[in-house]
Image (spheres, grey):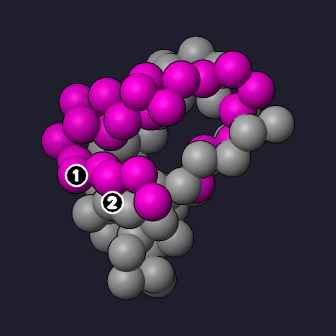
Amino acid sequence: MKVFKFKTNIDCGGCVNAVTPFLSKTPGISKWNVDTSNPDKILTVESEEVAEEDIINAVKKAGFNIEKI
């Protein structure tokens, strides 16, 4: 299992709801969550086979900023 961590601007429940369909449609993601209480709004993604680029593209398509940390 690989764990990816990203800094985002997903900062509320509504934002999490907005990004959910994009991450849910990304093949290979087992589990993900956003720590909205962290100042950097850390997105953690667990996966066996997803490409980092696919996660970044999904979040950008949803209209949010994302940066690998």
Seen as rendered, the residue at the extreme front is: 69
Q: Quadrant of residue 36?
A: bottom left
Nearer the observer, 48 or 14: 48
> Mark 1 to mark 2: distance in Å?
5 Å
Q: Residues in magenta?
A: 44-69
- From the top left corner, tell me how far across and down residue 34 is, in percent: 50, 61
Residue at image coords 23%, 30%: 61
Q: Secondary structure at mark 2?
A: strand
Asked if the stretch drawn in magenta spans residue 19, the answer is no
Q: Is residue 42 left or right of residue 1?
A: left
The N terminus appears in which quarter of the rendering?
top right
Task: Find disc 2 in the rendering and name its residue.
Answer: 8
- From the top left corner, tell me how far across and down residue 58 is, in percent: 35, 30
Q: Is residue 38 left or right of residue 60?
A: right
- Density class for disc 1 (Cα within 10 Å; few <14, some 14-19, many ≥20) is some
Task: Find disc 1 in the rendering and name its residue.
Answer: 65
> Along the polypeptide, which appears first: circle 1 or circle 2?
2
The C terminus appears in which quarter of the rendering?
bottom left
Residue at image coords 46%, 83%: 37
Residue type indicated by callout 1? Asn
- The reply to whether discs 1 and 2 touch (Cβ–Cβ < 8 Å) is yes
* Mark count: 2
Seen as rendered, the residue at the extreme right is: 1
Seen as rendered, the residue at the extreme left is: 63
- From the top left corner, tell me how far across and down residue 15 is, in percent: 30, 56
> Is 42 above or below relative to 2?
below
Residue type indicated by callout 2? Thr
Asked if the stretch drawn in magenta spans residue 66, the answer is yes
**Does any portion of residue 14 appear in the rendered image?**
no
> Is 53 above or below relative to 56?
above
Q: Is residue 1 left or right of residue 64?
A: right
